[in-house]
Image (cartoon, rainbow, N blue to C red):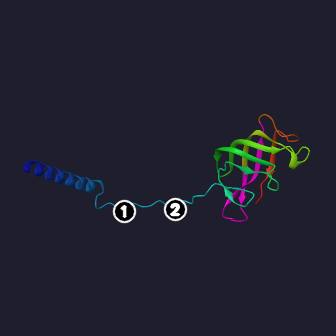
Amino acid sequence: MRQMTRTAVTICAALGLTATVGSAAAAPASSPPAQRPAAVRQTRPPVLVDCFGHAQVRPSRFILACGDGNSRLVSLHWNSWGARSARGRGVNVVNDCVPYCAAGRFHRYAVVVKLDRPQPWKKRPQVQHYSRITLFYPKDRPAHVGRVVTYPLWN
């Protein structure tokens, strides 16, 4: 038992010495301290401002018709969200307002979404927000709407 204890202590001491020597060899005393790279200005990608004036990044839902909610995007999945534009896919849920909006039915249309034209946000000028949205309808689309529609976004 005594022999095993001595062997264990010897092995531990040897490992400790090896670790110390290895560390010293890896960073010689004469080497200067590591220099940090110059501060790199990290800019955040633009945000999407919702109807309530909140900044959204890669939202899964977005209301297009703030006044009455009769057009909104749901099930959004973003392929990219960058400094110049964002692209994604989802569903545009639109009220047909027939015979009038309160009695109308909501219909779902597959849509490809593009956000672009970033500009300073009035609420927080240091933050960029996308100022334009373009919707591409690859199949069916709402009545009286072109296959591609572009809307300015609020600030």
Picture coordinates of residue 138, whole percent (x, y): 77, 35
Q: Residue at x 73, y 56 (%)?
A: 50
Q: Which residue is mark 2?
A: 39
Q: Residue at x 87, y 40 (%)?
A: 143
Q: Residue at x 71, y 42 (%)?
A: 90
Picture coordinates of residue 52, whole percent (x, y): 73, 60
Picture coordinates of residue 95, whole percent (x, y): 83, 45
Name the outermost residue toward the top: 139
Depth check: 63 or 33 in front? 63
Residue 49 belongs to magenta span: no
Q: Quadrant of residue 30?
A: bottom left
Q: Quadrant of residue 131?
A: bottom right
Query: Principal SS element in the magenta part?
Result: strand
Q: Residue at x 52, y 62 (%)?
A: 39
Q: Quadrant of residue 13?
A: bottom left
Name the outermost residue toward the front: 103
Horizontal side, residue 139 vs residue 60: left or right: right
Q: Amino acid at mark 2?
A: Ala
| Residue range highlighted in magenta | 116-137
Q: Which residue is mark 1?
A: 33
Q: Mark 1 falls on what kind of element?
A: loop
Q: Quadrant of the C terminus?
A: bottom right
**How many numbered marks appear?**
2
